[in-house]
């Protein structure tokens, strides 16, 4: 890990998000800077005091539109207090050493999201200062100095409180130990339940504004959380117990609650709330314990939840992100988390994305009006990325219940989703199972007569067929395969080969009778079953590149036997070849198909634009 200059980092963390200091704005004192700016470590920056108010005069705050939600009671930690700056020490880096102006209080955002500080105050003996009118990023610190409006800290003793929405969420009363030419800090950094100690009891320096006591950037503190793979981990640091990072197919978005209404206490806090009880459930379908550091869940409006560093999710385990979650509840062994504000899932239509630490999509869902019926939507088959989303009450194993956060749709704990529906009434989940197997299950491997190549798009011609927002004549090439079987078939090992021998091999994927699956050459998104308009196909990526002229395709089962083929054909830009009649007829240009109405393509849908399997 890189160690950052203590005071340089502290000065940077004083900057409200969105402010900058130009390299040529050098200064020695604040007099060298333009109005509204102060001197910090030789640079003119915006005065943080502009964003703070003494006395809690909230009405005087400038109306600033922020792209983050207000902080909640558990988002911030009061981590360090300096009442007695050592004589001659310029703690705030403004060029002036002062035993009063350099007093400070440090708060740190320990949540997984950016939070607004406009509803946050620091109280010293009844006098308050607003923390600021800006967003504080995860693991960032806000250091409020006396020069920023912090009420004076008495060396001999005082009570310092952190307030959110006017309520005290953390407080520390110190005595004469506050006057030892050093700060007081949490013995276990960022742990609000920890005792307070003199700074030199846990570090070599007398204070550390904006950083951990050990000088590292948050949260890389002794006793904090450190990401696995950090080769410079020091003694006493907590290291994640897993190291395997998830890739596409390892995690599945399994259930989404966009409309809790007034009947679903999803987070089990005893209160029905249309925002706090929203949730997104993901399920680890891999055989590995996965490290969720940096993995994010986001929605179409731009709200993002980031899993805490060091979080491990075991095989067959689920994780649930609620709008708000504090503690308690029984979620069948799933990992519960809270966004800590209004995540804002739209009831009628929205997108949900699950991305890895690099921003690559692991799974994504576009849903429609089905999500707005005072219940969740869930995979028809738990954990099956090929399975359609349905209303929870319509799911085969749900027994009519409206939701099952952290559990299988039946109410059974993951991964035991093969058992029947749980006995119970509406939203109440009871630990009584019915052994009747009423839900769909995947059948045997695909054999002759089970699958057909139904539509081929070899020349996108600028059409965004994979709907990732970027038209690309290579990535948007696709092949649509439909099931002709009477029951579900397993696609694992099925191969799609082009004329030159390029091959795509299906992973473990259950395809239900009459439904379709898309294989794109590439693209930025792995769509869910509901991603394409009204469609039921689950796109994959990695198809061989398709030539625009004289291209042919062969579909083989896991043993190498031919299941179907597409004859050598030339492609028309922006138009596909499709079977007419659907699934069983010969290939024709899409515009010529009897049910197409002259449309040029229908990836993931029947030629008439309707959803599989009926096409009616």
Image (tube, grey):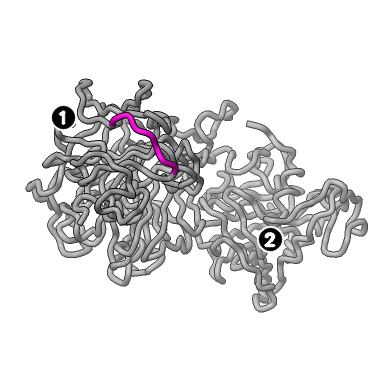
Residue ranking furthest to the bottom: 59
* Viewport quadrant of the C terminus: bottom left
Location of the N terminus by quadrant is top right
Q: Which residue is tagged 2?
A: 157
* Residue 517 visible: no
Closer-to-camera residue (233/414): 414
Residue under the image location 25 percent in, 46 percent down? 387
Locate residue 403, reporting x and y percent: 26, 59
Secondary element at tag 1: loop
Q: Could you tell which of marks 2 and 1 lies nearer the N-terminus?
A: 2
Identify the residue at image location x=43%, y=39%: 459
Secondary structure of the residue carrying numbered label 2: loop
Viewer-proximal residue, 281 or 473? 473
Q: Range of the magenta residues?
A: 567-573
In this picture, is 551 found above or below 387?
A: above
Q: CA distance from mark 2 to mark 1?
A: 79 Å
Question: What is the x, y in percent for residue 419?
Answer: 14, 45
User: Residue 48, position in %: x, y?
Assistant: 75, 60
Q: Quadrant of residue 514?
A: top left
Q: Residue at x 66, y 32 (%)?
A: 2
Please tell me which residue is depicted at 17% across the width and 30% down the height of the picture. Answer: 445
Crowding near the residue tagged with mark 1, few <14, some 14–19, many ≥20 C-alpha atoms within 10 Å: some
Residue underneath mark 1: 447
């Amino acid at each position: 890990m890189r160690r950052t200059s203590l005071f340089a980092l502290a000065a940077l963390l004083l900057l409200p998000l969105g402010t900058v200091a130009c390299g040529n704005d050098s200064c020695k004192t604040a007099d060298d800077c333009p109005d509204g700016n102060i001197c910090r470590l030789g640079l003119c920056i915006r005065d943080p005091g502009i964003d703070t108010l003494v006395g809690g005069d909230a009405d005087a705050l400038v109306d600033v539109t922020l792209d983050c939600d207000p902080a909640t009671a558990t988002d911030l930690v009061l981590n360090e207090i300096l009442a007695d700056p050592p004589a001659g020490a310029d703690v705030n880096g403004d060029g002036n050493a002062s035993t009063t102006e350099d007093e400070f209080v440090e708060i740190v955002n320990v949540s997984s999201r950016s939070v607004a500080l406009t509803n946050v105050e620091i109280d010293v003996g009844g006098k308050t200062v607003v923390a600021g009118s800006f967003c504080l990023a995860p693991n960032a610190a806000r250091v409020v100095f006396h020069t920023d409006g912090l009420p004076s800290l008495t060396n001999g003793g005082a009570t310092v409180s952190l307030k959110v929405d006017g309520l005290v969420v953390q407080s520390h009363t110190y005595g004469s130990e506050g006057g030892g030419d050093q700060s007081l800090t949490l013995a276990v950094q960022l742990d609000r339940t920890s005792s307070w100690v003199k700074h030199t009891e846990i570090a070599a320096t007398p204070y550390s504004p904006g950083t951990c006591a050990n000088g590292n950037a948050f949260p890389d503190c002794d006793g904090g959380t450190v990401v696995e793979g950090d080769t410079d981990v020091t003694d006493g640091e907590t290291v994640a117990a897993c190291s395997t990072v998830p890739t596409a197919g390892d995690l599945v978005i399994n259930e989404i609650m966009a409309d809790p209404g007034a009947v679903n206490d999803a987070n089990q806090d005893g209160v029905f709330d249309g925002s706090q009880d929203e949730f997104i459930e993901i399920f680890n379908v891999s055989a590995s314990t996965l490290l969720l550091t940096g993995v994010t869940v986001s929605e179409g409006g731009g709200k993002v939840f980031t899993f805490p560093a060091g979080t491990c999710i075991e095989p067959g385990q689920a994780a649930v992100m609620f709008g708000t979650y504090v503690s308690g509840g029984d979620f069948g062994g799933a990992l519960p988390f809270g966004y800590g504000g209004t995540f804002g899932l739209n009831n009628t239509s929205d997108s949900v994305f699950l991305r890895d630490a690099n921003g690559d999509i692991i799974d994504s869902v576009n849903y429609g009006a089905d999500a707005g019926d005072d219940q969740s939507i869930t995979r028809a088959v738990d954990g099956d990325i090929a399975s359609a989303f349905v209303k929870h009450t319509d799911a085969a194993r749900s027994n009519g219940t409206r939701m099952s956060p952290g559990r299988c749709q039946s109410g059974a704990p993951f991964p035991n989703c093969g058992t029947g529906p749980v006995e119970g009434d509406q939203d109440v989940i009871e630990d009584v199972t019915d052994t009747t197997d009423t839900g769909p299950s995947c059948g045997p491997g695909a054999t002759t007569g089970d699958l057909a190549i139904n539509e081929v798009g070899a020349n996108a011609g600028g059409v965004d067929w994979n709907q990732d927002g970027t038209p690309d004549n290579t990535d948007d090439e696709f092949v649509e395969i439909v099931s002709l079987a009477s029951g579900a078939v397993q696609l694992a090992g099925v191969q799609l080969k082009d004329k030159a021998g390029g091959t795509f091999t299906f992973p473990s994927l259950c395809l239900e009778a009459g439904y379709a699956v898309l294989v794109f050459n590439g693209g930025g998104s792995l769509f869910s079953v509901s991603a394409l308009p009204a469609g039921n196909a689950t796109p994959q990526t990695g198809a061989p590149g398709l030539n625009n002229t004289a291209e042919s395709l062969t579909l083989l089962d896991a043993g190498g036997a031919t299941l179907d083929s597409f004859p050598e054909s030339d492609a028309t830009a922006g138009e596909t070849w499709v079977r007419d009649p659907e699934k069983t007829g010969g290939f024709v240009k899409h515009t010529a198909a009897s049910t197409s109405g002259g449309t040029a393509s229908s990836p993931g849908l029947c030629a008439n634009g309707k959803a599989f399997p009926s096409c009616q």
